[in-house]
Amino acid sequence: MLRKHLLTLALLAIAGIAQAAQTIDVYRDPNCGCCKQWIGHLRENGFIVNDHVEPQMSAVKQRLGVAPRLASCHTAVIDGKFVEGHVPAEQIHALLAREDLKGIAVPGMPLGSPGMEMGERKDAYQVIGLTHDGKDVTVAEY
């Protein structure tokens, strides 16, 4: 798996389309399969993932300031900001350039979002940003 990840990064760099590799910490329940698929999506998009199996996910979310209305099955941290749920990699890259957001989330587990690809069905969903003063803003729609 590590060899495949390194090869992917090398090929992207050679093609000139790789962004600087960013490290992201992902916290997930030990029994969740879609979390592993989302981690795969991140790795395929150039992220270095530190995978943390965490049986007390509600405590992690609370510590990071993830509001219950934004909750999903896994929580990540990158550059001091939270990423909640099945957020596409492109939106994580965009988050890093925004100073106004504490984090972003895809609430719930919408079918068709990264890690939730299950057949032909694709639900419409939004990526919601949480500002430092606690307001929700829509940052993308899929």
Image (cartoon, grey):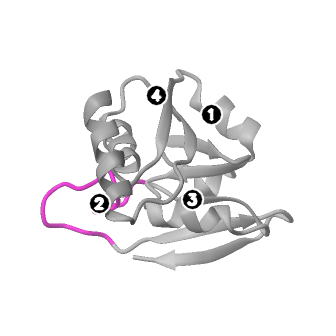
Q: Earlier in the sequence, mark 3 or mark 4?
A: 4
Q: Earlier in the sequence, mark 1 or mark 4?
A: 4
Q: Earlier in the sequence, mark 1 or mark 2?
A: 1
Label 1, secondary structure: give it. Answer: helix
User: In the image, which is nearer the foreground, mark 1 or mark 3?
Assistant: 3
- What residue is rendered at 43% in x and 54% in y? 86
**Percent position (x, y) of residue 60?**
66, 33
Q: Which residue is mark 1?
A: 58
**Percent position (x, y) of residue 13?**
38, 55
Quarter that holds the N terminus: top left
Q: Earlier in the sequence, mark 1 or mark 3?
A: 1
Quick check: 7 left or right of 30?
left
Residue 79 shown in magenta: no
Quarter that holds the C terminus: bottom left
Q: Which residue is mark 4?
A: 29
Query: In terms of secondary structure, what is the magenta stretch mainly?
Result: loop
Q: CA distance from mark 1 to mark 4?
A: 10 Å
Quick check: 66 left or right of 8?
right
Q: Amino acid at mark 1?
A: Ser
Would residue 1 be seen by someone viewing this image from the given angle? no
Q: Which residue is mark 2?
A: 111
Q: Earlier in the sequence, mark 3 or mark 2?
A: 3
Q: CA distance from mark 2 to mark 4?
A: 19 Å
